[in-house]
Image (cartoon, grey):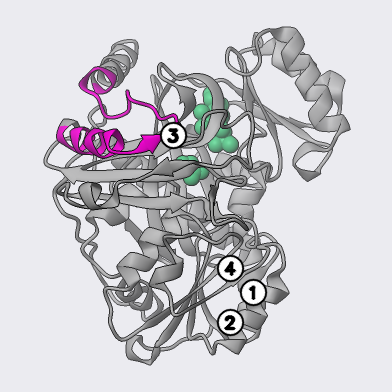
Amino acid sequence: MTTANNSSVKRVLVVGSWAKEQISIENLSGNPKVEIFSYMDTRNPGIIPQVKGYHIGSFKDIHSIVRYAKEQEIDLVIITTASPLSMGLVDALEAGRILTFGPVRLAARLESDKEFTRRLLQKYMPSAVPQFEVFEDTRSAIEYAEKLNWQVAVKPIGLTEGLGVRVFGEQLKDENDVKEYIRQVINNRIGGSARVIIEEKLEGEEFTVQCFVHGKYILSTPAVQDFKKLLPGERGPNTASMGSYSQQGHLLPFMEEEDYEKALEIIRETLEGFQKETGKTCSGFLYGQFMLTASGVKLIEYNFRPGDPEWINTIMILKNNLLDIIMGLFQGEEQELYFENQATVCKYVVPEGYPERLDLNLDVNLNEEAIRKIQGLKYYYSCGLDNKGKLNVGTERGIAFVARAPTIEEANERVERAISLVDGEFYYRKDIGTKDLIDSKVEHVNRLRRSR
Ligand code: AMP
Ligand code: GLY
């Protein structure tokens, strides 16, 4: 591991193109002594004015990223996007003696290889893993799904841009759908291998806990709940997420302290287990997605990058500077994260037709001056400018509007006020952050707790 001290870092490169990168760069800009550079795969109009320099290129071209970091004499690279990690970007940067915050290729397996992570946790914390088996043979996979009464999630092993997992009762309507998708995953090698995970379908409320990790150091951030379905009532197709909320403190309205502690214990056990098994330590932003079920907290998956939008809720109330946190971790300092005691709500404005169609233009007029007057409200771009200078969502989403306020409802009112000032044709989820939605989550978990 290449090291440096805080004051020797003058030039920082952020690898990633979306709203979570824009808000990270805004936070980093709070340190006037550093110059910030960006490597993006799209021309994000929120990032361009904030950085000293930027390069547009593919995230899969790790040589291009390393070359840009060398050309710009970067002192620290922060990687917040997933795709180059499993290709060994961190390993390549470190081999070039460039200090990097992100997981080496082996550690990125916690995200990119669901079988590896499930088996690791089965050994180190079995209570956190749903019942599952991995199959290469279609017939045995189907037999196992039948044994679980078709109440299953069918998962490819590798990365699928968040679209590979299908769940009975959601994307899989009946047992024929289950059988057909098992065949597709194996025959078409979805996720990169001719293997499939069949897993017990869990019922509960999902929540996200994100941490900064480096060796034995784990710094956790408040829990956030995100909403992946396009339509209210968790209906319609999956999206990259339509929005998210957090409440004051670090819990969600349906959580108890022990649920948060359990999620942290799962993260700790995973990282310790990983080190025991591989002899390597992990470094980077670890995103844990959990489900609170009648039989406790279970791990759904890890990403080795911040969540979008969950990272936006988090940085919106973070008082520390990201550079101080990361350099503190490299130097092995004991440190604490400080957050404003505020709730947050974030909602994505997307083009009509998303996500069935991508590469759409988002033709909106933001009324920026009026929106800037709303207290505690910001917006960030998960889209880029096309050749004609129009906003285009590419494979991404749109614009994230986020507010902080003493309560979730007040934060929601601020976001609603901002979106009411946007002219044009667009879609967003009105229900995220409303009292009705939050009450329904609390009621759901109360029912699960009573059934224990
Ligand atoms: P993943 O790509 O593993 O995050 O899965 C995508 C989504 O599928 C998650 O956000 C969950 O909503 C759902 N999911 C994954 N595993 C299960 C499971 N075992 N039971 C029910 N839903 C699941
Ligand atoms: N919010 C979902 C994700 O970042 O993957």
Quarter containing the N terminus: bottom right
Asked whether residue 316 appears in the rendered view, the answer is yes
> Which residue of the protein is positioned furthest toward the left in this rendering?
406
> Which residue of the protein is positioned furthest toward the front in this rendering?
388
Residue 138: quadrant of the picture = top right
Single out the mark in the foreground, 4 or 1: 1
SS label for mark 2: helix
Which amino acid lies under the numbered mark 4 shown in the image of this protein?
Lys
Asked whether residue 130 appears in the rendered view, the answer is no
Kindly identify the residue that appears in the image at 17 percent across and 30 percent down.
409
Residue 366: x, y in percent? Answer: 34, 45
Tell me the CA gap for discs 3 and 2.
Answer: 33 Å
Magenta residues, start to end? 410-438
Tell me the CA gap for discs 3 and 4.
Answer: 36 Å
The crowd level at tag 2 (other Cα within 10 Å; few <14, some 14-19, many 20+) is many
Which is nearer the N-term, disc 3 or disc 2?
Answer: 2
Asked if residue 328 is positioned above or below residue 104 in the image, the reply reads below
Residue 369 appears left or right of 219 = left
Tell me the CA gap for discs 1 and 3.
Answer: 30 Å
Q: Which residue is mark 2?
A: 69
Tell me the CA gap for discs 4 and 1.
Answer: 24 Å
SS label for mark 1: helix
Tell me the CA gap for discs 4 and 2.
Answer: 25 Å
The reply to whether the C-beta atoms of the residues labelled 4 and 2 are less than 8 Å apart is no
The crowd level at tag 4 (other Cα within 10 Å; few <14, some 14-19, many 20+) is some
The reply to whether the C-beta atoms of the residues labelled 3 and 2 are less than 8 Å apart is no
Q: Is mark 4 within 8 Å of ligand 1?
A: no
The reply to whether the C-beta atoms of the residues labelled 1 and 3 are less than 8 Å apart is no
Q: Which residue is mark 3?
A: 242
